[in-house]
Amino acid sequence: MELFGIFFAAFLINNILLIRFIALCSFFGVSTKIDTSIGMSLAVIFVMTISSAVSWMIYNFLLTPFHLEFLRTATFILTIAALVQLEELYMKKMVPGLYRAMGIYLPLITTNCAILAVAFLAIDYRYSFVQAMVYSLGVSFGYSLAIVLFAYIRERMALAPIPKWFQGYPIAFITAALMSLAFLGFTGMFGL
Amino acid sequence: MNLWKDFNQGIIKENPVLRLMIGLCPTLAVSNNATNALGMSVAVAFVLICSNWVVALIRKITPDEIRIPIFIIVISTFVTISDYIMHAYYPDLYAALGVFVPLIVVNCIILGRAEAFAYRNPVLNSILDGVGMSLGFALALVSIGVIREALGAGSVFGITLFNPAVAATIMILPPGAFITIGFIMAFLNKAEKKVQ
C-alpha cells in the first residue's frame, strides 16, 4: 500500500511535467509528433530507472560514508552523462531494435532535468532502495502519459483555427495549462 | 560598442526564456510569487556570471574534446556554492525553491552560454554577456512572478494589494504558470509584428 502510494503520487498527483514543472524543455520540444514523444518516453523510462538506481547507490554507499555529500551535484550529473553513453553503446550492440526506436533521444536525455531531479528527490525524501525504484517508475510513467497525451492534442491542433498571435508556442502553453488543471483534479485521491 | 552589444542582447533581443525558450523549468516552477522569482534570479545570475568568467578564463587551456565535462564541473561547483550559501543564510527561500536550486546545473541557459559564448570570447565580454543574460532571465521571471502573485494572491512581494479572498487562486497553482507565459508570448508576438 505504501509503495502504491509512492507510485500513484509520482504518476498522477505530482506529475513531473504538469505539476512539478521539471523537464519542460523536452515537453515542448519533442511533443510535435506522437512518434517522437513515444521514443522519448521509452528512453526516459529506461534511463531514469537505471540512473536512479546507480545514483542512489553512489550516494548511500560512497558519498555518505566518506562525508562527501557536497559533491552530490557534480557526481550525479557526471554519473548520468557517463551512464547514458554506456547504455547507448550497450544497446547498439545488444538490442539494435530498441536502439533504433529510441534513436537520437538517448543522447538528449543527458540534459533532461527529470533524470537528475529524480535522483535528487529520491534522496531528499530519504527513500529506501525499493521505494526509490518505485518512485522513479512512477515518475517516468507519469512523464510518458503527459507527453504522449500532449502530442496527440498538438497533432490535432495543427488543423484547428487558432488566433494569429497564439499560433505556435503560446497555444501550446494554454493547452498545457488545461492539462495541468485536469491533473490537479487528482489531488487528494486515496488520501494522498 | 561591442561590449555594450554583448551586454544588451540577452535582455530583450535574445531573452533566454521568452525568445530562446530555454530555462523554462525554473521559470514556471518558482514564479508563484515575486520573492521566490527574485531569489531564483539571483542564484542563476551568480552561477551564470561566475561560470562564464571561469570558462572564458580557462578557454585557452581547455582541450576541445572534453570541454563539455569541464563546463559541467565548473558549473556544478558554483551551483554547490550557491546551494550551500542559500541553505545557510536564507533557509525559507531554500525551502521554497527546493530541488530547483541543485537543478540550476542542468539549466540550459548556463551550459548554452558557456558553449556558445564564453568558450569563444575574452573574459570581459563573457562576464558582460553573463550579466545581460541574467538580467533577461530575471526580467522574465520576476514579471511572471509579479503577475501571478498579483492575480492569484492579491499581493506583490508580500505587500497586499487587495483582498486575497477575491483573488483567482488558480494563478498561483501550476496551471496559472502556463497561462501567464502563454499570454505573455502571444503579446510579444503581436508587439513584434507591429514593430515590423
Image (cartoon, coloured by chain):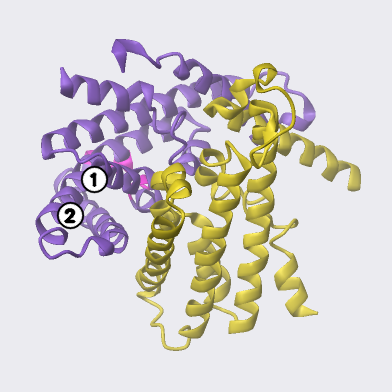
Cβ–Cβ under 8 Å for marks 1 and 2: yes
Instruction: Check disc 1 and report its element: helix, strand or loop.
Output: helix
Q: Tell me, what hue is chain B?
A: yellow
Q: Which residue is mark 2?
A: A59
Q: Is residue A99 magenta?
A: yes
Q: Residues within 10 Å of mark 2 (few under 14, many from 20)?
A: many
Number of residues whose C-alpha sits closer than 10 Å to that of mark 1, classed few (under 14), some (14–19) or many (20 or more): some
The image's mark for residue B103 is none
Q: Report in which chain the residue with disc 1 lies.
A: A
Nearest the eye: B157 or B28? B157
Q: Is residue A38 in sight in this rendering?
A: yes
Identify residue type, mark 2: Tyr
Magenta region? A97-106
Q: Residue B169 placed where, x, y %?
A: 60, 21
Q: Quadrant of residue B45?
A: bottom right
Residue indicated by mark 1? A123
Q: Main secondary structure of the magenta part?
A: helix
Image colour assigned to chain A: purple
Q: Residue at x 64, y 26 (%)?
A: B152
